[in-house]
Amino acid sequence: MTANDQASRLRNMARQQIPEATLFSSRVMAVTSGKGGVGKTNVVAGLAMALAQTGQRVAVLDADFGLANLDILLGLSPTHTLEHVLRGEKVLEEIILDGPMGIRMIPASSGIQELTRLDTAAELRLIQGLQRVSETTDWMLIDTAAGIHDSVIKLLLAAQEVLLVTTPEPTSLVDAYAMVKVMHLRDPQKPIWLLINNAQSEEEAEETIEQLQAATRRFLDRELKTLGMIPSDPCLLQSVREQRGVVERFPRSPSAMAFRQIADQLKKKVPLQKDGFASFWKQLSFEES
Ligand SMILES: Nc1ncnc2c1ncn2[C@@H]1O[C@H](COP(=O)(O)OP(=O)(O)OP(=O)(O)O)[C@@H](O)[C@H]1O
Ligand SMILES: [Mg+2]
């Protein structure tokens, strides 16, 4: 038996350590964009809070290995990350931070890129940790780095659903299309939800949606699922300055209302996945590209 065969046998054994009875239903959604700075991190924080407000148990995974700043928006300061779990220095529960409204954050920005080359012991540690977290979680929202990097694409492919954020700006729209195209070529079945952020009006958002849909229809022969828009909102900017989520800080603001409305749509439209977390992990660590 070659070293490779042996490694893959060990991996399979690690996978089989998930007893069927302990797989819990949850939804795993990765938030992405083509262009940077379009509002992904704010969307993760806003949706996490809007979902949490309706009693959903939410965990957020900060997987932006460029500039991790979800912690800032949630008013948290992580001292340890997934890297420490993978090295065996911490268990997952020890790095998870308790944020506002019961939202739990897994700081993964450093460590997430190592996920594809774990040894068996590290895999087991991670899978058992994720299993324990999934027992008390309805949603895992993943904040990613912008752009079409291979490690980002892997994360997106592993997630059950992808939420693509774009602003109405032509540059953001072109990059959003590029992202859809890359995703589509890798997995044409992957559900992609389109969300327009920072729109000046409903009309502008609708136009943006139609432009992107026209391109995907014509060149990829597919329609994106749409979630509508988050308006451009000074209250959101103010809440970022205060390191608070807009949903909590200015609940009556236009963007907070939009987040709540989108959270309701997500609850209705996104199906529960039987082993959401475990399946995400398996795909992430076994996807070869
Ligand atoms: N709806 C909105 N109204 C007003 N300002 C917004 C809105 N959405 C985002 N912003 C502002 O846009 C900036 C970028 O937002 P954010 O950090 O969430 O983007 P990002 O896509 O996560 O960026 P990066 O690619 O760097 O991770 C922030 O200053 C934020 O306050
Ligand atoms: Mg961000």
Image (cartoon, helix red, strand yellow):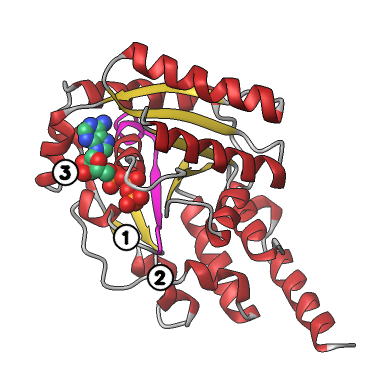
Q: Secondary structure at mark 3?
A: helix
Q: Position of residue 196 (x, y in %)?
A: 39, 27
Query: Which residue in the protein does label 1 denote?
Result: 68
Q: Secondary structure at mark 2?
A: loop
Towards the viewer: 71 or 234: 234
Q: Quadrant of the N terminus?
A: bottom right
- The answer to which quarter of the image holds residue 106 is bottom left
**Is label 3's Cβ within 8 Å of ligand 1?**
yes
Crowdedness of circle 1 by 10 Å Cα count: few (<14), some, many (20+)? some
Magenta-tinted stretch? 50-65
Query: Which residue in the protein does label 2 denote?
Result: 110
Q: Note whether 38 is above or below 195 in the view shown.
A: below
- The answer to which quarter of the image holds residue 248 is top left
- Do the residues under discs 1 and 2 have CB atoms within 8 angstroms? yes
Residue 62 inside the magenta-drawn segment:
yes
Query: Which residue in the protein does label 3 denote?
Result: 240
* Residue at the spot 55% in from the left edge and 43% down from the top edge: 179
In the figure, is residue 151 to the left or right of 275? left
